[in-house]
Image (cartoon, rainbow, N blue to C red):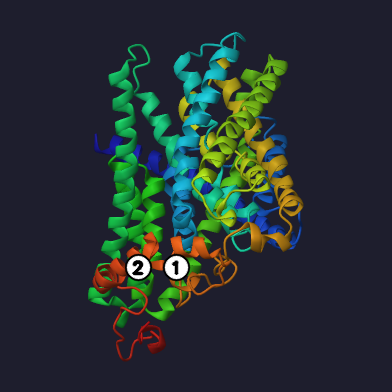
Amino acid sequence: MGLDVAAHLVRLGVLNTTSDYASVVSINLFVALLCACIVLGHLLEENRWVNESITALIIGLCTGVVILLTTNGKSSHIFVFSEDLFFIYLLPPIIFNAGFQVKKKQFFRNFMTITLFGAVGTMISFFTIAIAAIAIFSRMNIGTLDVGDFLAIGAIFSATDSVCTLQVLNQDETPFLYSLVFGEGVVNDATSIVLFNALQNFDLVHIDVAVVLKFLGNFFYLFLSSTFLGVFAGLLSAYIIKKLYIGRHSTDREVALMMLMAYLSYMLAELLDLSGILTVFFCGIVMSHYTWHNVTESSRVTTKHAFATLSFIAETFLFLYVGMDALDIEKWEFASDSPGKSIGISSILLGLVLVGRAAFVFPLSFLSNLTKKAPYEKITWRQQIVIWWAGLMRGAVSIALAYNKFTRSGHTQLHGNAIMITSTITVVLFSTMVFGIMTKPLIRLLLPASSHAVTSEPSSPKSLNSPLLTSMQGSDLESSTHIVRPSSLRMLLSKPTHTVHYYWRKFDDALMRPMFGGRGFVPFSPGSPTEQSVHGGR
C-alpha cells in the first residue's frame, strides 16, 4: 500500500514537472511578446494611425498564425482564455489606475452626464441590440439559441472598451471628451456586467411589473453599494496610513498597504456579488485625494509609477491575448460550414453596435444640453460625433462575457454558440482596429487643436506622461487653472458660494481632511522623506 502511494506521488511529480516546464516555456514566450509590444509601441509613438493596443493586437494575430503553422492547425495561443484571469487579475489594475489618475474636478463636473450616458445610455443600447437580435437572428436558424441568449447578446455588445478609450483620446488635448467618454466607459462596463449577471438569474417566462421593479431595485442597489464600498476602502486606507504614519519606518509597507487595500476592495465587491469595477474605480479616486497625500514623498513617486506600470502591462497583455485567441481553430471549425452566415451575423452585430450607440448618444446629449446654460458647457454636434465614434470599440469585456455565456472553460461544440463566439471576435477585431485607427484622425478633423480651449473645459495636469499627482493635485490644482469667463449673469448664478463644489470643499476642509488627511492636512514628521513644503500648509 505504501509503495503504491509512493509510486503515485512520483507519477504526480513527473506530470507536474512536465506541466511546469510547458508553463515556463509559455510564460517566457508571452513575456518576450510583451517586450516586443513595448518596443514597437515606442517606435510608433508619433504615428497618427496606430496606437499600442492595435500594435499588441496585430502582434497577437501574427503570433497566432505562427503557432497555428507550427502546431499543424491545432492551436493558436499560448494560454487558454479564462474569465477569472481577466476579471480577477487583469481588469482591477487598469480600472484602479484610471480612477487614481483621473482629473477629479473634470470628472465630477460632468458626473451627471457621465451617469446618464453610462447607465441610462447602456440600458437604451441594450434594449436596442437585444430587440433587434431577437427580431433578426430568430429567423436565421443559427442554432439552439433562445430569448435568454439574445438578451445576453444585447448586454455583451453594449459593453464599450474603456481600455482602448484610454489610448485613443488624450486627457490633455480633449479633457472634456476624455472625462465624458472614459467615465461613461467605466460606468458602462459595470452596467453591462451587472445586466449580464442579472439576466442569468432572470425568469424570462414569468415577467410582470413586480419582477421588473425588483430587477431595477437590485440594479440601483448594486451601483450604490459598489460605490460605497470603494469609498469606504479608500477612506480606511487613508485613516490607517495617516494615524500610523508607516512611512517613518518603511516606505515599502505603505506602498504595499495601498496596493493591497485597493485589490481587497475589488475582491470584496466580487465576493459580495457587487460591481468590482465601480468599487475599485472609486477606491482609486478616494486614494488619490486622501491616501496619496499621507504617504512619504518617495512613496508617492513609487505608487504613481507602480500603478501606471501595472495598468500598462495588463492592457498590453489583454490585446496581445485577444489577437492570438481570435484564431482559435476549434471555434472556427464548428462555424466553418456556414461562412456566409458567420459573415452576415458579424455584419449585423456591427451595425447594431453603431445603431445602439447612436440611439442614446445624440438624444441624451440633447437632453444634457437642455440643462446647461453656458454655451461652453454644452456638448457640440462635433463632440457628439466623437463621443459616438470613440465608444464604438468593443474589447476584452465583450469577449469575456461571450465566453462566459457561450462556452465552458473556453470550449464549445455547439454550432450556434461557436458562431456567436466567432462573430464576437470578428466584431472586436474590426471595431478595435478600424475604428481605433480612425479615431485620432477624426478628432483632428472635427476638433482641431485651436478649438480645444473653446470646445472643452480647462485642462489640468497630465496623468500618465507627466506628473498628475503632484503636491498640488486634482481639484486643488485645477482650481488654479484659467477658466473661460462666463457672462455677468452666468457669473452671478455660478458664484462659488452657490456651487456644489464650494460646499464640498467646505465640508472636505472642515471634516474629511482633518480626519483622513490630504494636501496641507498631514503633519510634517522630522526625519521623514516627505518634503516640508508639501505639509507646511495650503
Is residue 373 at all visible to an observer of this figure? Answer: yes
Marks 2 and 1: CB-CB under 8 Å? yes
In the image, residue 396 above or below residue 476: above
Q: Is residue 55 left or right of residue 228?
A: right
Camera-side residue of 331 and 23? 331
The residue under label 2 is 505
Is residue 77 at all visible to an observer of this figure? Answer: no
Query: What kind of residue is marked 1?
Result: Ser
**Image location of residue 64, percent across then percent down:** 67, 39
**Image location of residue 312, percent across then percent down:** 55, 58
Of the 4 image quadrants, the one containing the C terminus is bottom left
Of the 4 image quadrants, the one containing the N terminus is top left
Tell which tag, 2 or 1, sits nearer the viewer. 2
In the image, residue 310 above or below residue 437: below
Q: Residue at x 37, y 74 (%)?
A: 293
Q: How many marks?
A: 2
Which of the labelled discs sits on residue 394, or is there none?
A: none
The residue under label 1 is 475
Q: Residue at x 72, y 61 (%)?
A: 449
At numbered mark 1, what does the secondary structure look like: helix, strand or loop? Answer: helix
Q: Earlier in the sequence, mark 2 or mark 1?
A: 1
Q: Is residue 185 left or right of residue 218?
A: right
**Image location of residue 447, percent across then percent down:** 71, 54
Query: What kind of residue is marked 2?
Result: Arg
Q: Residue at x 42, y 80 (%)?
A: 297
